[in-house]
Image (cartoon, rainbow, N blue to C red):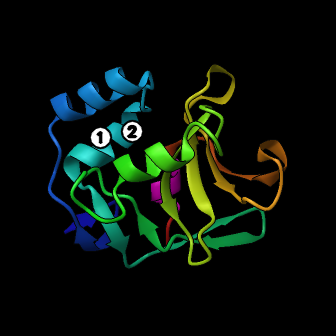
């Protein structure tokens, strides 16, 4: 299966839009449309092209969190563990690198939909590295 020339190595069952809407309503969060589209059409866990370059910085995404409550490392479990405390309800984590740092999407008004790499070893704002204006541009930038 391919998405924007990406080879999907593993994925999870595709969620229905109603499942995502229910999750958003229950948790008072709104996903960017391009992220929702990714979930309902691909719901990838691993992709072959896992490197993203931005301003001479290269990052590697080890895995995407699948929207599947039954998966050991699901989006839902990660959300409940990180969203309130670590990410201060400002970001949602959609994946991680090999060291456990998080790839996050902003869900706050000021920078809604932007993608960052989030390191835990600093305060939230200091630990964020901007990667992309949108989730779609992040996905399209993977090589």
Can the viewer see residue 136 in this picture? no
Q: Residue at x 38, y 58 (%)?
A: 65
Q: Is residue 9 magenta?
A: no
Is 101 placed above or below 78 here?
below
Can the viewer see residue 135 in this picture? yes
Q: Which residue is mark 1?
A: 37
Say which element carries label 2.
helix
Task: Give the left or right position of residue 57, taking residue 59 as reference.
Answer: right
Is 63 placed above or below 115 here?
below
Q: Which mark is residue 34?
A: 2
Residue 43, image x, y percentages: 27, 55
Residue 77, image x, y percentages: 38, 51
Q: What main secondary structure does the magenta stretch of the protein show?
A: helix
Query: Magenta residues, as a range?
Result: 136-141
Say which element carries label 1.
helix
Q: Is residue 138 magenta?
A: yes
Residue 124, image x, y percentages: 77, 45
The answer to the question of whether label 1 and label 2 lie on touching residues, with beta carbons closer than 8 A, is yes
Residue 56 sits in which quadrant? bottom right
The CA span between labels 1 and 2 is 5 Å
């Amino acid at each position: 299966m391919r998405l924007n020339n990406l080879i999907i190595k593993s994925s999870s069952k595709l969620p229905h839009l109603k499942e995502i809407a229910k999750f958003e309503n229950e948790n008072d969060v709104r996903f960017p449309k391009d992220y929702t589209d990714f979930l309902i059409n691909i719901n990838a866990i691993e992709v072959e092209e896992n490197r993203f370059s931005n301003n001479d910085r290269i990052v590697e995404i080890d895995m995407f969190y699948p929207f599947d409550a039954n998966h050991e490392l699901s989006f839902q479990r990660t959300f409940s563990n990180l969203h309130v405390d670590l990410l201060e309800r400002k970001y949602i984590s959609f994946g991680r690198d090999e060291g456990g740092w998080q790839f996050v999407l902003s869900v706050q008004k000021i920078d809604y939909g932007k993608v960052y790499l989030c390191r835990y070893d600093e305060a939230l704002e200091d630990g964020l590295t901007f990667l992309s204006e949108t989730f779609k541009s992040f996905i399209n930038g993977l090589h």
